[in-house]
Amino acid sequence: MCEHPLPENSGKDPVTPRTDDEKQAVVNRLRRIEGQVRGIQKMVEDDRYCVDILVQISAIDKALKRVGYSLLERHTHHCVKDAIQKGDGDEAIDELMKVVQQFSK
Amino acid sequence: MCEHPLPENSGKDPVTPRTDDEKQAVVNRLRRIEGQVRGIQKMVEDDRYCVDILVQISAIDKALKRVGYSLLERHTHHCVKDAIQKGDGDEAIDELMKVVQQFSK
Amino acid sequence: MCEHPLPENSGKDPVTPRTDDEKQAVVNRLRRIEGQVRGIQKMVEDDRYCVDILVQISAIDKALKRVGYSLLERHTHHCVKDAIQKGDGDEAIDELMKVVQQFSK
Amino acid sequence: MCEHPLPENSGKDPVTPRTDDEKQAVVNRLRRIEGQVRGIQKMVEDDRYCVDILVQISAIDKALKRVGYSLLERHTHHCVKDAIQKGDGDEAIDELMKVVQQFSK
């Protein structure tokens, strides 16, 4: 499972632009994650117990994956669906499968 | 695999205090991760392509796991080893196994 | 991420029946995995070194995931695509997202 | 995280031989997994719905990981602990960390 990874910048756009509310909801979740990452920095500086830090890292990891899944969901319901409806689905599906694999490793 | 999770705060301390250099190295990696999380916020605000954002999230996830593994390694080489040498190893090993499981889910 | 799991038996069928060649290819991979699982039983009976057994388990795990991804790919290229073309895509996409999540945990 | 993988055969032995009961318990779990793998072969031959098969694969994956964790646990409580008590712990810990990483990918 070490095939060609997806490019960092595909040059594509979302088929349906995100609404301001959608953007805000994702940004809010990412801000909370950013705060959690800062929280761990403090735990390290305070020389806190390793396992306690690991529990926090594991919580951030899960929060990050949840954001990822919600983006994946939106992407499939909009971009992939739209591509399929335009008869252009196979490429979109291949890309989707690739990101799913990269994401679950 | 949904047993009792580890507590958020165990009240324990690392057996060997982290040196300033060790702390700095971990904090630097976490700062870079914090910057990456902010980078994704900008990608969302700029309405960038979902898959491009997912590729970044997946990169952060891997960076976070690497920090986790390095903490795990230090923890095992110091706290767990020390507990075993003091004849107190079984509890430390159980805790280690728990955090490994929580971490790899 | 501990929502309602997917049912064991949905009562559905693949929209495009698998050809005999397709079936055979998947069955062959599963037979190899079955053989690997038997191989580990022997390793346990022969009291082989734990880490060597774990390396094998990890290899089986990866082989199993690869089979899973190939089924997922076919499912998306056929069943999900077909549902979307029939205007019935959202349910199929929700199911797909659910199985992706269950699978990558 | 793509460093040198562990060798397939380390040439080592478990420090405490597994008892017959221990062996039997692991073998029984592996036999059940073997049966589950055969069950999926039948599902593929019967052309069952892809998502139903994926749910089963995901269940096998979890069962396999559980066996892995129980071996990991025994390994740490016996081999790693013993190596540490003999003053030879660092190598055993490095190996443990490597297998944990390989296992959770």
Image (cartoon, coloured by chain):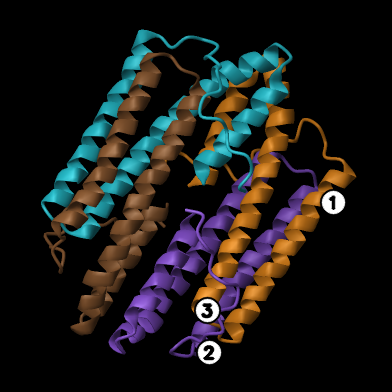
Chain colours: A brown, B cyan, C purple, D orange
Indicate the amino acid at tag 3: Ala
Tell me how far mark 1 sits from mark 3, CA to CA. 33 Å
The percent position of residue B21, horizontal first and vertical second, equals: 34, 11
Could you say which is closer to the camera, residue A36 or residue D63? A36
Do dots 3 and 2 share one subunit? yes
Tell me how far mark 1 sits from mark 2, CA to CA. 38 Å
Q: Answer with left or right where residue D81 lies relative to residue A26.
A: right
The percent position of residue C55, horizontal first and vertical second, equals: 60, 46
Q: Residue at x 36, y 15 (%)?
A: A45
Residue C20 is tagged as 2
Q: Residues within 10 Å of mark 1 (few under 14, many from 20)?
A: some
Indicate the amino acid at tag 2: Asp
Q: Answer with left or right where residue D17 lies relative to residue D43.
A: right
Report in which chain the residue with disc 3 lies. C
Do dots 1 and 2 share one subunit? no
Q: Earlier in the sequence, mark 3 or mark 2?
A: 2
Dividing the picture into quarters, in which one does residue A16 lie?
Answer: bottom left
Indicate the amino acid at tag 1: Gln
**Is residue A94 at all visible to an observer of this figure?**
yes
In the displayed orientation, state which residue is furthest to the front. Answer: A21
Q: Check whether the beta carbons of the residues at disc 1 and disc 3 lie within 8 A of each other.
A: no
Q: Answer with left or right where residue B11 lies relative to residue B36.
A: right
Report in which chain the residue with disc 2 lies. C
On the image, numbered disc 1 is attached to which residue?
A: D24
Circle 2 — which element?
Answer: helix
In the displayed orientation, state which residue is furthest to the right. Answer: D20
